[in-house]
Image (tube, rainbow, N blue to C red):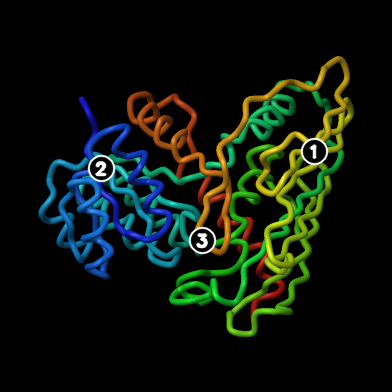
Amino acid sequence: MKLNFAITGCGRIAKRHAEQAVKQGNLVAVCDIVPAKADEMAALYNAQPYYSLEAMLAAEKELDVVSICTPNGLHAHHSILSLQAGNNVLCEKPLCIAIADAKNMIAAAEKAGKKLFVVKQNRYNPPVAFLKELIHTGKLGRVFSFQVNCFWNRPPAYYTGWKGTRELDGGTLFTQFSHFIDLVYWLLGDVADVKTMTGNFAHPSIAFEDTGAVLFRMKSGAIGSLNYTVNSYDKNMEGSITVFAEHGTVKVGGQYLNELEYCQVKDIREPELPKGNPANGYGFYQGSMSNHDKVYENLVLALQNDQHEFASAEDGLKTVEIIERIYAPSAP
């Protein structure tokens, strides 16, 4: 039996969701407060357009999953409304931009008896999955240290509408680099301590930093750094994570964590990995690798089997917690 999907928020990322929803089921409804956006997406997929989430939830009683593709600061409210209406929810990253909101979302899912998932598509990058396997099977031994680099470009023209606002965007780590924070946690465990320096050098119109440097001490004892910026000249330069461990050193790099750049591991030859998907293209800038096909494939499996590993709301909460800890020393 095919699942019935609905999407709220018909912007750029919603197009990725729509493309995959129709491969896994039926896209029956879409919603946006800008009627033209809802109408355009509805026409492409023979879906019913709505111009408020409340109207869509009231009218559509046979939904299985609502995908939340609205601005970051609305994720909590829209997810909770969808859960209360009796639907499972797939929320775009970040889960939300406040710990209290994340906890309210999880409580709403538990009360409704429904599932709440978050999009963490970089987990499916072939070299990232390879690094995960090395760490969690013990083939690298004890992890000593790590380095994460996020050097992207976001020109001033990117920051229109809700982007760049404290209330709906939340910050560079939420909108651009939450996937990297997720991977630090997913690969290396929880954080014990952070130290942060941030600055805004080239984007005076936004309400937060465009550059940051973070030091981590993990609960495992490993130490590491995160260096990030949206000031890479003209285009995205690098998205990478390097792990230095007892039995090996591995760097996953490229612009989008899409290349195994270095692999020197005891008793293991560098593998021939499958080619990953291209990056999400948005005209004058690019985002992370487009792995929404794998997100939707695994969403279906997770709905069928509670034991299937898929990015949960609790994973999303952990990302929000770590970002809040990073931002706390530098918050205005």
SS for dot 3 = loop
Left or right, 301 with respect to 258, comes to left
* Residue type, label 1: Lys
Instruction: Rate crowding at label 3 as few (under 14), some (14 to 19) or many (20 or more) other CA atoms within 10 Å.
Output: few
Identify the residue under disc 2.
5
The residue at 63%/39% (across/down) is: 186
Task: Specify the label residue 103 is tagged with.
Answer: none
Identify the residue under disc 1.
251
Which callout, 2 or 1, points at the residue further toward the start of the chain?
A: 2
* Front residue of 90 and 160: 160
Q: Position of residue 312 (x, y in %)?
A: 46, 41
* Residue type, label 2: Phe
Which callout, 3 or 1, points at the residue further toward the start of the chain?
A: 1
Q: Position of residue 315 (x, y in %)?
A: 53, 44
Q: Quadrant of the C terminus?
A: bottom right
The residue at 54%/71% (across/down) is: 158
| As drawn, 89 above or below 265 | below
